[in-house]
Structures are given as C-alpha cells and as structure tokens.
Amino acid sequence: MTTANSDDVCRRDVEASESDRLGDGLGKGAAYSSLLPPGVQKPAEGHGSLPFPFNQNRWLDELGQAFGYRLLVMLFASQHIMKGFAPSFTGPASQFLFASYNVAGPRMQIFGGIISLPWAMKPIIGLVSDCFPIRGYNKAPYILLATMLGIVGCAALAKIPAERLSVNAVVFCLFCMQLQFSSCDLLTEAKYAEKMQSNPARGPDLMTFVWFGLQGGGLLATLMVGPVLDHYGPKAPFLIGGGKPACA
C-alpha cells in the first residue's frame, strides 16, 4: 500500500515538473514575441542567410532571412530577368522583324494587338490556375507550361530562317513569348503577395527589391538592344535573350 502511494506521488511530481517546463517555454516564447515591434513577425524556420557574396549586403541578407532566399531567386528570375530585361530586349526587335517581312504599318499594329493579348488574359489565366490545379499545384505547373511555349517560340524566331517561317508563324511565336511573360508575372506576383501578408513589416523592402531589379533590367536591355540590332540584325535579340526566359 505504501509502495503504491509512493508511485502515485512520484508520478504527480513528474507531471507537475513537465507542466512547469512547458509553461516556461511558452512564457519565453510569449515574452520574445512581446519584445518585437508591432507588425514584425518572427522569422520562419529554415530562412537562412543568402549564399556568398550576396550575404555581404546587409539589407539583402536581412531580406533573405525574412522571406527566404528561394523566393528572392524566384523573383530575380521572373521579375528582374523575364519581366524587366527580356521584353525590353526582344520587343523592339519584333518591329524590325516585321519590317524584314515587308509588313505594312497598319497590319503591324494589328499584329501587335494580337501579340499583347496574353496581358489582357491575365484574369483568365489566374482563374484557370486556381480552379484547375495540376497534381495539387496551381502555380508551378502553369509556369512550366508557359515557359516551355515561350522557349520554343523564342528559339524558332532565333534559328529558323525567314524563308521557312511565315509572318503568321512569327506572330504565333511572339504570342507564346508574351504568354510566358504574363503567366509567370501573374503567378509569381500572387506568391510574393502571399509572403508579404505573413511579414508585412518587411513588405515595402520586398517591393523595393522587385521594382528596383525590374527597372534596372529594363534599363540594361534598352542600352543593349540598339547596338545588337545594328550589328547583328533583328533575330539576334531572340538568340541572346532566349536564355533569359529559359532561366526564368
């Protein structure tokens, strides 16, 4: 009888000490959270520093710790390179490409409207990706499909001679490229908007990262495209810029 009572007392002591330990842990976590400024979230687990040499920039390294370097790499590829650099580098070349086919100005404007249709289709693209996920994913599969179309269209414009590529095929290839740009832009915007909601205090920094790189990529492409067209012709930008959509 005495042994049974002793066992009960020991068990209660163990349970009490375990409860105290958990309570202290929760208290420390609550105390840590209370020290943070309003709107600042604790960094999510797994968000480490950026690899060298990017971690040498304090602002960029802190941004990587807040959102994860994988998100920053995705935004660099999709926003800086694909949306910022590639359209500004290949867009002017398309007009010279149509000129090589002796396309009249009014007809060129019609082709331009057809080529830019994917940007007006962004609500439809977003609705389809949300309503019809592929194997449980509603962003990555559509990004990959659009990227494949964009790469094929860009490669065709760069490598197939004008004698074997009709002007209607050129329009279709340019349409596929714009479909990649608009789809990847929409779906990656949705992703980083979701991340900004989880850490609103660093949201302005993330927007600065996106738009600074986007405008910088467009400026670099504007400076490069003129000499490239002058020296190598209207197909060269698609050959050089073809790797940019593939990278994205």
Image (cartoon, helix red, strand yellow):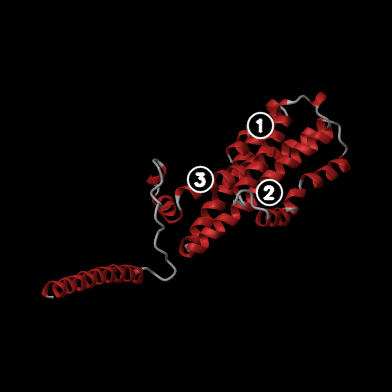
14 relative to 155 in the view: left or right: left
**The quarter of the displayed image where residue 240 is located:** top right
143 relative to 34 in the view: left or right: right
Count residues near mark 2 (Cα–Cα under 10 Å), then give few for <14, some for 14-19, many for 20+.
Answer: many
Circles 2 and 3, Cβ within 8 Å, touching? The answer is no
Sequence-first tag of 2 and 1: 2
Say if 5 sits above or below 144 in the image. Answer: below
Q: Secondary structure at mark 3?
A: helix
Count residues near mark 3 (Cα–Cα under 10 Å), then give few for <14, some for 14-19, many for 20+.
Answer: some
Sequence-first tag of 2 and 3: 3
Q: CA distance from mark 3 to mark 1?
A: 29 Å
Give the residue type at disc 3. Val
Sequence-first tag of 3 and 1: 3
Give residue 73's mark: 3
Q: Secondary structure at mark 2?
A: helix
The x, y position of residue 112, in whole percent, is: 80, 44
Q: Which residue is mark 2?
A: 182
Q: Which residue is mark 1?
A: 227
Give the residue type at disc 1. Pro
Circles 3 and 1, Cβ within 8 Å, touching? The answer is no
Q: Secondary structure at mark 1?
A: helix
Give the residue type at disc 2. Ser
The x, y position of residue 206, in whole percent, is: 50, 56
Q: CA distance from mark 2 to mark 1?
A: 27 Å
Can residue 185 be seen here? The reply is yes
**The quarter of the displayed image where residue 76 is located:** top right
Count residues near mark 1 (Cα–Cα under 10 Å), then give few for <14, some for 14-19, many for 20+.
Answer: few
Can residue 83 be seen here? The reply is no
Of residues 14 and 151, which is closer to you in this image? 14
Dot in front, 3 or 1: 3
